[in-house]
Image: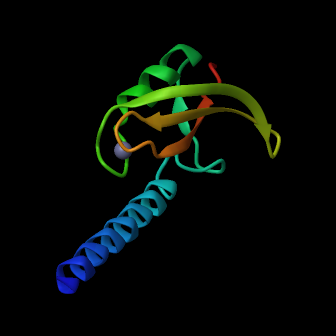
Amino acid sequence: MSKSRKDRREVQREAVKDAKRRLSVAMRQRGGAPDLPELVESASVIEVIARGTPCVVCGAEVAVVEHEAKTLGGTAVRVVHVKCRMCGVARKTYFQIAAAN
Ligand SMILES: [Zn+2]
């Protein structure tokens, strides 16, 4: 029936909308944007935290794809690219190593 097909499309569209919403919320939280890095004590915990943060879309486990050191706006940050093992959504998380003093 065409109605059920329409319903399925509706559900799919809702799911995409929901995923986009979750992604944009995550980008406004600490670690989600270059100007909002998560502060860490040392580089060694960065990948542990990145891996331990579930996919913002489906909540599944993520894998670290890449870990790069960058300077953004004069600040040294680490950008960790993660990819969800379940839904495949890729995301970048930002870290800054707190200066020890
Ligand atoms: Zn996912």
Colour scheme of this structure image? rainbow
Report the residue that reaches farthest toward the bottom: 3
65 sits left or right of 89 in the view: right
Residue 68 percent location from the top left of the image = 69, 27
Q: Residue at x 65, y 51 (%)?
A: 35
User: Is 15 placed above or below 68 here?
Assistant: below
Q: Is residue 16 visible?
A: yes
Image quadrant in which the C terminus is located: top right
Residue 33 percent location from the top left of the image = 59, 50
User: Is 80 placed above or below 44 here?
Assistant: below
Is 70 in front, or is 96?
Answer: 70
Is 69 in front, or is 90?
Answer: 90
Report the residue that reaches farthest toward the right: 74
Number of numbered discs on residues:
0
User: Is 74 placed above or below 69 here?
Assistant: below
85 sits left or right of 4 in the view: right
**For residue 95, which quarter of the picture?**
top right
Residue 30 percent location from the top left of the image = 49, 47
**For residue 42, which quarter of the picture?**
top right
User: Is 14 placed above or below 86 here?
Assistant: below
Is 10 in front, or is 17?
Answer: 10
Report the residue that reaches farthest toward the top: 44
Q: Residue at x 22, y 85 (%)?
A: 2
Residue 9 percent location from the top left of the image = 31, 75
Is 100 in front, or is 66?
Answer: 66
Q: Residue at x 81, y 46 (%)?
A: 73
**For residue 26, which quarter of the picture?**
bottom left
Q: Quadrant of ligand 1?
A: top left
Image quadrant in which the N terminus is located: bottom left
